[in-house]
Image (tube, rainbow, N blue to C red):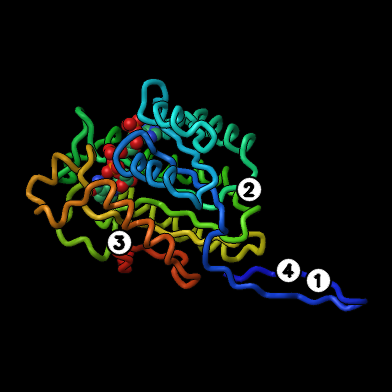
Amino acid sequence: MHCYSCFFVGSNVYIETMTLNSFKDQYSVFVQGASKGIGLAFVREYLEDKKIKKVIASSRQLEGSALTELINQYPDKLEIYALDLESQSSIDDCAEQIINSNSSLDLILNVAGFLHSNSIKPEKRISDLNLANLSKNFSINTFGPILLTSKLLPLLKGSPYSVIANLSAKVGSIEDNKSGGWHSYRSSKAAQNMLTKNLAIELSMSNKFSTLCVSLHPGTVDTDLSKPFSRNTDKDNLFTPEECVDNLIKVINNLKEADNGNFFDWSGKKIPW
Ligand SMILES: NC(=O)c1ccc[n+]([C@@H]2O[C@H](COP(=O)([O-])OP(=O)(O)OC[C@H]3O[C@@H](n4cnc5c(N)ncnc54)[C@H](OP(=O)(O)O)[C@@H]3O)[C@@H](O)[C@H]2O)c1
């Protein structure tokens, strides 16, 4: 990541190139989708981390949530905002509130995701597809996160080095797809991956930004999202949210400029698009 700074000696102008590959000493993180699972584990981990100045977190429901309990413990370090990724006005309000109360962000983690609900199951066959399933998956996994991220980009301008990490899923890899099925989820994650790549390219072309943008696969993690499908996953391949977050933080903290616009799993291994 190259940063340019100008300085003057007499009448000469010197341009200095600095290569930055890490966050500044004290930095701020936004965890989008922090009510439970992996997002909540990120919030807990970053609240404990002395290098983190501020943790900003969003959740659909704030009242009575785990986040409101954490606010009592960390009143100066944690800020929480309501966000429903299926609502344009909620995305607009959330972005406006964060922008109005924060001068700078160094890490944006888009974590929220949708795979199933009581009424919506991942499709086995193309004939199972319907507009409601597709819309729900794409709104939460694809549209909402990028719409919010685009509004928060000005907050990264104040940071000398920043990262946007989007929680994707290996099943969103087109090249890796050997078994089909889960049409809405897979395709919404594949589309999310494309937006990640596009944003990475766009930001790398702008001299106003020193931002890396990547997709991350967390592995199979023991959360509500995976529960109905992880029964047969052996213990060694099923991470707790805390283990997952430890893995992903290592990957994020080891990113290099050449990693911009790529897709990594929890161990830092590149996944083909
Ligand atoms: N767990 C795995 O094995 C696994 C594997 C691969 C990829 N992933 C990805 O990892 C990410 C986190 O998943 P997880 O396992 O932590 O799932 P989770 O425990 O089910 O949490 C999902 C999160 O998404 C939020 N969310 C759902 N609908 C929303 C909406 N309309 N607006 C705003 N937030 C919404 C949920 O908030 P509410 O509490 O308000 O519903 C919750 O905070 C997802 O992107 C998922 O696709 C997970």
Q: Secondary structure at mark 1?
A: strand
* Residue that numbered label 3 is attached to: 265
Q: Which-is-in-front pick, marks 2 and 1?
A: 1
Q: Which quadrant does ligand 1 occupy?
A: top left
* Residue that numbered label 1 is attached to: 7
Per the model, the C-alpha gap separating discs 3 and 1 is: 41 Å
Q: Which-is-in-front pick, marks 4 and 3?
A: 4
Q: Secondary structure at mark 2?
A: helix
Query: Is 177 drawn above or below residue 126 in the view shown?
Result: below
Disc 1: CA contacts within 10 A as few (<14), some (14-19) or many (>=20) = few
Image marks 2 and 3: residues in contact by CB distance under 8 Å:
no
Q: Is 101 placed left or right of 6 in the picture?
A: left
Q: Quadrant of the C terminus?
A: bottom left
Task: Please say whether residue 89 is visible from this viewpoint.
Answer: yes
Disc 4: CA contacts within 10 A as few (<14), some (14-19) or many (>=20) = few
Relative depth, front residue between 61 and 20? 20
Amino acid at dot 1: Phe
- Residue 224 appears at what percent x and percent y? 22, 37
Per the model, the C-alpha gap separating discs 2 and 4 is: 19 Å
Taking the spot 21% from the left edge, 51% from the top edge, the residue there is 239
Disc 2: CA contacts within 10 A as few (<14), some (14-19) or many (>=20) = some
Taking the spot 19% from the left edge, 28% from the top edge, the residue there is 118
Q: Secondary structure at mark 3?
A: strand
Task: Name, please, the residue furthest toward the left.
Answer: 232
* Residue that numbered label 4 is attached to: 5
Q: Secondary structure at mark 4?
A: strand
Task: Name, please, the residue furthest toward the top.
Answer: 63
Marker disc for residue 46:
none
